[in-house]
Image (cartoon, rainbow, N blue to C red):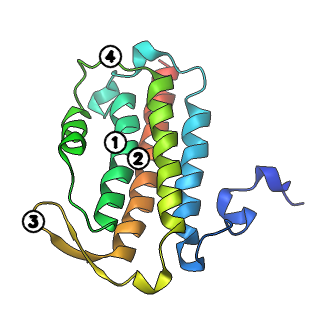
Amino acid sequence: MTKPKENLEVWMRGPIAGLAPLLQPVAHAILQAREEVNLMMIDFPDELIWERPSGVASVAFHLQHLSGVLDRLFTYANNQILNEDQLELLALEADSTQFLTVKGLLTRFNNQVNKALTQLKNIDEKTLLEPRGIGRKQIPTNLLGLLFHAAEHTQRHTGQLYVTVRILQNS
């Protein structure tokens, strides 16, 4: 018995229109993360977003980091360096004195995913092996490496967020 198409994971639903074949896995992973994050955060209370059960990273950290890492890695993919606003947001990811809401954090994440997908649609597959630098030290990589890392890092934090949410909801 097969699942109905709407219950399939993103990668099983077929190619995303307007996206080069080699970039499909990146988009699929990011879109899968978006679906999972939005589902797990339904009815999650704002007052728990900074809780750190057993010392793990908070829900607020993960939601900010998911947005931030996509923004930063796609900036490097564009062969640019981070601007002051990006550096400030990075510094604030673990700052529990911020007043944040689940709705606001999800809006930022969803907007960042949309921005990443737009950027992916504008990438020519022929450029995937072009060199890129990461951070102030310009650690060498290439465009494909940055995009792959953006996808896997997004998935990693989605999984960590899931565990933190489940622990807090069952406390």
Kindly identify the residue that appears in the image at 56 percent across and 45 percent down. 34
The alpha-carbon separation of the residues under discs 1 and 2 comes to 8 Å
Q: Secondary structure at mark 4?
A: loop
The alpha-carbon separation of the residues under discs 3 and 4 comes to 33 Å
The alpha-carbon separation of the residues under discs 2 and 3 comes to 24 Å
Q: Secondary structure at mark 3?
A: loop
Q: Compare marks 3 and 4 and give the one earlier in the sequence.
A: 4
Residue type for callout 1: His
Which residue carries the number 1 mark?
65
Residue type for callout 2: His
Which residue carries the number 2 mark?
157
Label 3 close to label 1 by CB (< 8 Å): no
Q: Residues within 10 Å of mark 4 (few under 14, many from 20)?
A: few
- Residue 62 is situated, as x and y percent measured from the top left of the image, at 37, 38
Q: Compare marks 1 and 2 and give the one earlier in the sequence.
A: 1
Q: Is residue 83 left or right of residue 103?
A: left
Q: Residues within 10 Å of mark 1 (few under 14, many from 20)?
A: many
Which residue carries the number 3 mark?
137
Kindly identify the residue that appears in the image at 25 percent across and 22 percent down. 96
Which residue carries the number 4 mark?
99
